[in-house]
Image (cartoon, grey):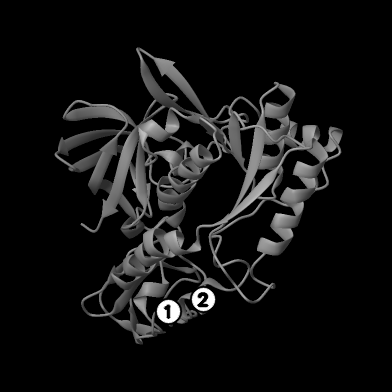
Amino acid sequence: MITTAPDVVVAMSGGVDSSVAAVLLHKQGYRIAGLFMHNWHEDDPQYCTAVEDFTDAAAVCQQLNIPLHSIDFSAEYNERVFHYFLAEYRAGRTPNPDVYCNRDIKFTCLLQQAKKLGANKIATGHYARIAQRDNKTILLKGCDSNKDQSYFLHQVPVEALAKSVFPLGEMHKNTVRELANQEGLPNHAKKDSTGICFIGKRPFKVFLQNYLAPKKGDVVDEQGKVLGTHDGVIYYTIGQRKGIGIGGSEGRPELPWYVAAKDIARNRLIVVQGKNHPAIFRNAATVTQLSWFHPVPQTLKCGAKTRYRQRDQQCTLSIDGQNGKVHFSQPQRAITPGQFIVFYAHDICLGGGIISAE
C-alpha cells in the first residue's frame, strides 16, 4: 500500500469510468490515491447506492493496492447545489445540478482535499480533454461524441482544469468497458448511473413533492381552453410528454400532448399536440450569467448545445456583459429556461450560461 504523498488523487465513484481512469494512471506509473465523496445522505437503500458504490470503489483500490480516502461533502453539496436546485424549480425553471456539482464540489472541494493529501493533480472519469495552447488551459470535447461530457464541465474554473487529468478523454466507452473486463475489475459490468444522483430510481415528481408543495392549476391549449388540471407547473418541463394527464379531446386529432410553455404567474400549463408543433420551437434564446474560459468577442458565431448530447447547433451570440442573445440558424426544439447553453468552436468548449425565460 502506498504511504507516500500521491501525485494524483482520483475521484472514485464506484463506477466503471473512474475505476478505469485509476487503472490507466496506475499503469502510467503515477502515485495515486482514491477519494470517495459522500455528497448526499439517504436512509432508504432502494434509492441511494452510496454503500454499494463505496464498496465497489474500495474493491478496485484494493486490487490496485492504492489507498482509498472517504470524505463527507454533503453539507457543501446541500448548500451550494441542492438549495440552487430547489430555488430554480420553485421559480418554475428546470435546473441542471450536475453542472454546479462539478464546479463547486468535484473540482473545488475535491481539489482542496487533494492538496491536503499532498497531491498537485486531481483526476476523474469524465469524457473530456484538456490541452495547453498559447499558454492557456483549453477544455476540449471527449473523443467519444456519444459520451462527451464537456457540457457538464463548462463552469469549472480554469484554474481547477489546469490541475485536472481526464484519462478517458481520448477513449470510447466500449473500449473502457473492454479494458475494465480485461483488468478483471470487480465492477466491470456495472451499469452507468443516470439521472440526478440524489433522486435515484424514485419517480422525480414524488421526490420533488417532498420539498415543494403541490399547487393545482389548469392545463390549457394555445387558445386558453381548459383541458384538465395539473398538480403544479414546477413539476413539468418544456417538451415533456409523459405525466400531463389529459387524453383525447373531441374534434382533435389523435396525437400526444406536449408541454409548450409554463405560465408561472397564472399557474397554467400550456400544451400542444404533436412532437414537432411549432409552439415548441424557438429561433432565439436569452442567456444570463455567461462565463468564459478565456475572453471572446462581443459578437460570436459558434456552435451551441442547449442540452447534453445534442449536436452543435450553429448560432450567433451577441454579448452584453454577463448576458446575451442567441440567434440560431435553425429553430430549436424545447429550449428550456434554467438549463445551460454551452458554446463551442469545433472541439473547443468556450463557456456558457443559463437560458432565461423570454
Query: Compared with residue 262, is residue 128 higher up or lower down, i.e. above or below?
Result: above
Rendered location of residue 302, percent (x, y): 31, 28
Kind of residue sitting beneath label 1: Tyr
Q: Tell which of 289 and 186 is nearer to you.
A: 186
Q: Seen in the image, is 254 located left or right of residue 222?
A: right
Residue at left offset 50%, top offset 71%: 254
- Residue 21 position by quadrant: top right
Residue at left offset 64%, top offset 48%: 69
Rendered location of residue 68, percent (x, y): 68, 46
Q: Tell which of 149 and 345 is nearer to you.
A: 149
Q: Distance between the Cα atoms at labels 2 and 1?
A: 8 Å
The mark found on residue 207 in the picture is 2
Query: Compared with residue 158, is residue 203 higher up or lower down, i.e. above or below?
Result: below
Residue at left offset 23%, top offset 26%: 296
Q: Which residue lies furthest to the left in this view?
A: 320
Q: Residue furthest front?
A: 3
Q: Can residue 190 be seen in this view?
A: no
Q: Is residue 345 visible?
A: yes
Q: How crowded is mark 2: few (under 14 residues within 10 Å), some or many (20 or more)?
A: few
Q: In which quarter of the image is the C terminus?
A: bottom left
Q: Is mark 2 on a helix, strand or loop?
A: helix
| Residue that label 1 marks | 211
- Residue 25 position by quadrant: top right
Kind of residue sitting beneath label 2: Phe
In contact (CB < 8 Å): disc 2 and disc 1: yes
- Residue 17 position by quadrant: top right
Q: Tell which of 338 and 81 is nearer to you.
A: 81
Query: Compared with residue 214, is residue 355 higher up or lower down, i.e. above or below?
Result: above
Q: How crowded is mark 1: few (under 14 residues within 10 Å), some or many (20 or more)?
A: few
Q: In which quarter of the image is the N terminus?
A: top right
Rendered location of residue 316, percent (x, y): 24, 33
